[in-house]
Image: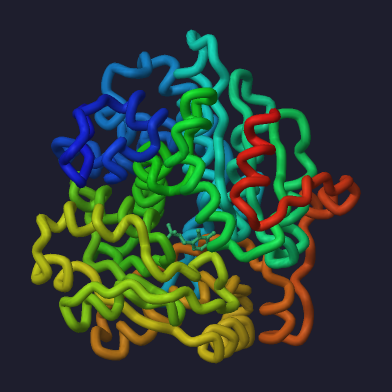
Amino acid sequence: MKYFSLNKQSPIVNFKEATILGQAPDKGLYFPERIPIHTPDFIGQLQQLSKEDIAFRVMEPFVGDTIPADELYRIVSETVNFPFPLKLINTTIASLELYHGPTFAFKDVGARFMSRCLSYFSKNQSNKITILVATSGDTGGAVANGFFGVEGIEVVILYPSGKVSPVQELQLTTCGENITALEVEGSFDDCQAMVKMVFADKDINDRMQLCSANSINVARWLSQQIYYFLAYQQWEDQTAPVISVPSGNFGNLCAGIMAYKTGLPVKHFIAACNVNDAVPDYLLTGIFKTKPTTPTISNAMDVGNPSNFVRILALMNQDYTSFSSLVSGYTISDEVTIETIREVHQQYDYLLDPHGAVAYAALKQYQQFHDDAKGYIVETADPVKFPDAIKMAIGSEPLIPLAAMELFAKEKRSIPMLNEYASFKEYLLSR
Ligand SMILES: *Cc1c(COP(=O)(O)O)cnc(C)c1O
């Protein structure tokens, strides 16, 4: 499989090059040259296959010959080595729980797959790869965990001081070894701006091999298809599901649409957003306008200019009509999010996190006009990561699982960093 830049000004690359580069030199996102189609018997057989076999079959065409089959099988097996249960909340809505991995959020899947691919690719390389990542919370933890102890790879994470939850901060700052956390006096946007400046800085790129681990990386994006297949394996209804995806940068939904394009049965997708709703707006009006970011309680979706929108457009052949007939967009306020957590907890004894609650509320609204629609929400994080929102909704904080308790016994280690590019650059060059 070859990949081209959606800006069309860069050479064509293979999966290895696309993964190491992250973004194409012309700043475009990489996109596969063709969409592989699964045979109907693969889809029909899902129930008989193991999750490792499914993950292998899904990723193999995208990876091509850049990783030998036995290595790829090991990599996907390590990627999916935790449960992906599809649990019924009520008779028409199920929850695909993607938070049973090491950092309690779905980003573990993409981060684990990408880290293992990079580790394989860096084996025969003499220079170290430095992964730079800005995080608003969940990405940093997943990347830290995914790359922890991986030889040949150094990770530098920038996070906004005081703006991530306690569990999220501990996940970033307690690894040590090859993982360094920079605590920036500023916002997530400031962190992201500094990372972008580094990638554009020739001085630094001449001296270090830099790689980005955000969701524009093809290894992270494409491996997120796997769990849509694992969900269908557990889907018992005759008709295909409506899938509601809580969305921010739209990597997750874009992976779902890719899975659909390769042959996975899906009736409809829902782009569930908080008030940062550039895509729902586009679906209503046909006009895409980025917006300044507004902070919400589903903070991992506070994105005003979603990177993967251009990829979804490419999957839809730039056609608004096909896009809007496959995907519906909804905007869910913080008030409705809290109310949804409360109601679902009361009525069904099921605890949603704020992101899953946005997806649930959106699917509910869709069902008001499509009363035969059955589907599932993609539950992207464990409620334990958002104790304040849960307390607002149900009056008490969620029980902290044992694995998270262990974090509180560890010591936070971060390097304070001014919100100033010169200091950040000096730090990187002195490493
Ligand atoms: C990152 C994240 C999202 C948004 O995912 P995208 O792929 O950026 O749309 C949703 N929920 C949680 C918990 C996240 O961490």
Residue 322 lies, in percent from the top left, at: 11, 66
Question: Which image quadrant for residue 78?
Answer: top right
**In this rendering, does residue 129 appear at all?**
yes
- In the displayed structure, 429 sits above or below 85; it is above
In this rendering, would 211 be left or right of 265? Answer: right
- In the displayed structure, 250 sits above or below 131; it is below
In the depicted view, which residue is nearer to us: 303 or 270? 303
In the depicted view, which residue is nearer to us: 319 or 371? 319
In the depicted view, which residue is nearer to us: 191 or 39? 191
- In the displayed structure, 316 sits above or below 281; it is above
In this rendering, would 179 be left or right of 278? Answer: right
Residue 126 lies, in percent from the top left, at: 53, 10
Residue 252 lies, in percent from the top left, at: 39, 56
Identify the residue at image location x=33%, y=71%.
271
**In this rendering, does residue 347 appear at all?**
no
Quadrant that contains the C terminus: top right
Identify the residue at image location x=47%, y=74%.
293
In this rendering, would 342 be left or right of 36? Answer: right
Identify the residue at image location x=31%, y=31%.
57
- In the displayed structure, 19 sits above or below 275; it is above
Identify the residue at image location x=24%, y=43%.
43
Question: Which image quadrant for residue 295?
Answer: bottom right
In the depicted view, which residue is nearer to us: 84 or 113? 113
In this rendering, would 331 be left or right of 338? Answer: left
Residue 73 lies, in percent from the top left, at: 43, 23
Quadrant that contains the N terminus: top left
